[in-house]
Amino acid sequence: MTDCLIGVLGGMGPLATADLVQKIIAATPAERDQDHVPMVVWNVPQIPDRQQALAGMGPSPLPVLLEAVRALNQLPISHLVIPCNTAHHWFDALAAASRAPLLHIADATLAAMRQPIVAPSEITGLIATHGTLRAGWYQQRLAATGCEVLEPTPQEMDELFVPGCYAVKRGARVEGGILLEQLADRLAERGASRLILACTEVSPALSAVNSRWLAHSIDTTQALAQACVELWRQSRT
Amino acid sequence: MTDCLIGVLGGMGPLATADLVQKIIAATPAERDQDHVPMVVWNVPQIPDRQQALAGMGPSPLPVLLEAVRALNQLPISHLVIPCNTAHHWFDALAAASRAPLLHIADATLAAMRQPIVAPSEITGLIATHGTLRAGWYQQRLAATGCEVLEPTPQEMDELFVPGCYAVKRGARVEGGILLEQLADRLAERGASRLILACTEVSPALSAVNSRWLAHSIDTTQALAQACVELWRQSRT
């Protein structure tokens, strides 16, 4: 047993969680199995829908999320991460319930954006759920660095983002990718030169259609993976 | 919380565990997150090397595996699976230590082979570690169905299987895939018309090189994924 053990509070959705696991493995310099990041992954998707809850159209996921936090904390986890941006709405309550410190996905993302330093004059398109957009985590952090942020319109959310996101959740990655690539094109037409994929369903969808946008995107799942690899690296020095 | 919660004792290697998770998700008929198989995945690769241990060249992984079994059994898991064939050498001790029943990957594989029924006259090439070959799980089960089994030669093991398998463990999937495809070709030259990929590193490697052999293979990880999906389906009816 090492003193680094990453707890992953996942299942939102299950594919986004699998995507984080794969990105952690791919981002780890390793010569053998034992060099890889130790993690325990709670991938139990029977959690009330976060987007519906925040729209006032369904029960809160908080009780089930707290159960998962308690379950993971029964194990010797050293840190906790959540590969779902929207679930960060309940960040404070989950952090308070966890012995292991909880990393914020937006902090991991901003840390990843600092290297290499991006031109603050660039307009950044933000692809996220209604709940994440409303929370303002990314807008506030980017504003502090002087970056201009562009959000999807309400119509783009209804016609492209929401159906694209839910397509991934039922396994239709290509269908989701086609819709989300259209959304990226719209943001580009309005001036965005790079994107933040601030919903963890988006990157698997864009990958499924080999989207050219991936090269111009900051993927919050990738950023969270890098943060996990960094924690593991630090524990070994 | 449902009464089905699949515990995955993984990390051997980490990529093979991620492969199982993705195959479970892909094999699940789902319209939304909540339809997916609930699982908790112990992906902690700091386990002594199984192949080395069975060759008498390293410590036994059993104590660390038992720790992992105990950790997973602290959670309300209903079943336990191990996405590593070689680790099944310690199956009896691990099953005895687990409250949750432990599925055998070879039983899952033979169950998957029954549908569709394959011609018993076909020669089946078996790709596996020395430890798995020596254990005889697949040979015995296939012999009971009248199938003829072909194993790699010692030279093929040394020059193709072992370096291919360890390439995957350090993340070099394409390098591993090239070696393992050569091994598949050799087995075919000696009469095998289908393969059992009885080491969970093999399928990710062959996938990385888009191997034509995947269409003629029984993938033990895929079989284990199907068994997990079936347990979830049964729990919902």
Image (cartoon, coloured by chain):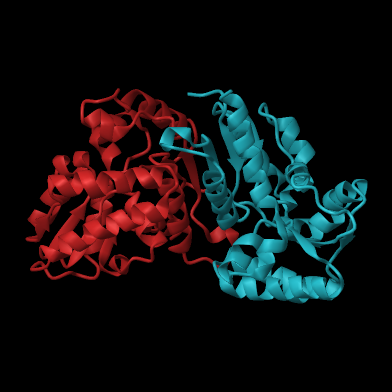
Chain colours: A cyan, B red
Total number of numbered discs in the rendering: 0
- Residue B104 drawn above or below residue A218: above
Quadrant for the C terminus of chain B, please.
bottom left
**Rendered residue at 60%/38% (across/down):** A229
Question: Going by the image, does B187 lie left or right of A207?
Answer: left
**Rendered residue at 64%/61% (across/down):** A203
Q: Is residue B83 visible?
A: no
- Residue A104 drawn above or below residue A96: below
Q: Position of residue A77 (x, y in %)?
A: 58, 29
Q: Quadrant of residue A9?
A: top right
Between residue B183 and residue B7, name the one nearer to us.
Answer: B183
Q: Is residue B91 visible?
A: yes
**Rendered residue at 75%/47% (across/down):** A116
Question: Going by the image, does A237 lie left or right of B44?
Answer: right
Q: Position of residue B63 (x, y in %)?
A: 35, 23
Between residue A235 and residue B160, name the one nearer to us.
Answer: B160
**Rendered residue at 43%/53% (across/down):** B19
Q: Quadrant of residue A207?
A: bottom right
- Residue B167 drawn above or below residue A188: above
Between residue A235 and residue A106, name the one nearer to us.
Answer: A235
Q: Position of residue A27 (x, y in %)?
A: 57, 45
Between residue A194 and residue B77, name the one nearer to us.
Answer: A194
Question: Going by the image, does A34 lie left or right of A173?
Answer: left
Q: Position of residue A91 (x, y in %)?
A: 76, 41
Q: Quadrant of residue B95?
A: top left
